[in-house]
Amino acid sequence: GKPQVSFNTYIGSESYAHLMNFADASQYLSLYQNFYGHAMATFNPASPSTTSNQGANTNWFKTLLRTGVTNNDNLSISGGTDKSHYRGSVTYTDQQGIALTSERKDLNARFNFDQKTLDDKLLITMNFQGTHSNSNYVDPNAFFDAAFVPSVISEFDPLRPGNYQYINNTDENNPVPKLVDVTNVGATNTMSGNLRLDYTLAKGLTISPFANGTLANSSY
């Protein structure tokens, strides 16, 4: 029959539903004074230290998260006759994660075909699929740092606006550059296919040999 062509696309988004409550600047300074018996030192540009109160009120988890956007496009074609049918499709998906820089891009192709022959005694069925994926991964340690860096510390260097702050004097690091400046990517390729033959020897008696195979490789 006449080939049928279709195209579908959609765009979606996702974001975090709830974050744990950590001490804001006011709460942290109160806890600091209660624990040490004195107020936290105020930031001194002449002797900068990240163990001082920089006047910030940073929610570190919010600095690591975003609204992730997903785009999906699909193009397909199908057709055939009373003896054969085919369908092919290509799908592209670009999915951003809710963590900064996290992302996955997939390109998938499929082809299905069946054919009757030998006076309809033999049915040939073939299916093939190939996928290429690129992924940007994030460092999970960034979220551990986000839980421990005080909210009174600024994301950016108070003395060099626009530059991420290097946190010294503590065991934690500024978590944002771990996601923004560190590259952690991977690629995966997969191909698979199968072939089935259904041959009718007699009424109610059919033999069905089947074969399939898969090839895959990944790099990180």
Image (cartoon, rainbow, N blue to C red):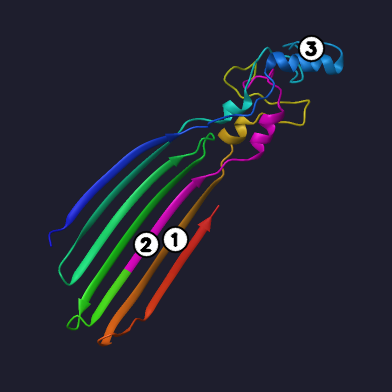
- Is 179 on the left-hand or right-hand side of 216? right
Give neighbour class at mark 2: few <14, some 14-19, many 20+ (Cα, 10 Å). some
Q: Who's the residue at 42% across and 34% down the image? A: 13
* Sooner in the amino-acid sequence: mark 2 or mark 3: 3
Q: Determine whether label 3 and label 1 are within 8 Å by CB.
A: no
Q: Is residue 151 magenta?
A: yes
Q: Which residue is mark 1?
A: 190
Q: Determine whether label 1 and label 2 are within 8 Å by CB.
A: yes
Q: Nearer the viewer, residue 45 or 194?
A: 194
Q: Secondary structure at mark 3?
A: loop
Q: Secondary structure at mark 2?
A: strand
Which x, y percent locates residue 38? 85, 11
Q: Which mark is residue 50?
A: none
Q: Label 3 sits on what residue type?
A: Ala
* Sooner in the amino-acid sequence: mark 1 or mark 2: 2
The answer to whether one can see residue 51 in this image is yes
Q: Label 1 sits on what residue type?
A: Thr
Q: Which residue is mark 2?
A: 129
Give neighbour class at mark 3: few <14, some 14-19, many 20+ (Cα, 10 Å). few
Residues rendered magenta in the picture: 127-156
Q: Which mark is residue 41?
A: 3
Q: Quadrant of residue 195?
A: bottom left
- Tell which tag, 2 or 3, sits nearer the viewer: 2
Q: CA distance from mark 2 to mark 3?
A: 62 Å
Q: Who's the residue at 64% across and 29% down the image? A: 20
Question: Is residue 149 depicted above or below 72 in this figure?
Answer: above
Quadrant including the N terminus: bottom left
- Is 172 on the left-hand or right-hand side of 91? right
Q: Secondary structure at mark 1?
A: strand
Q: Residue furthest front?
A: 204
Which x, y percent locates residue 197? 31, 79
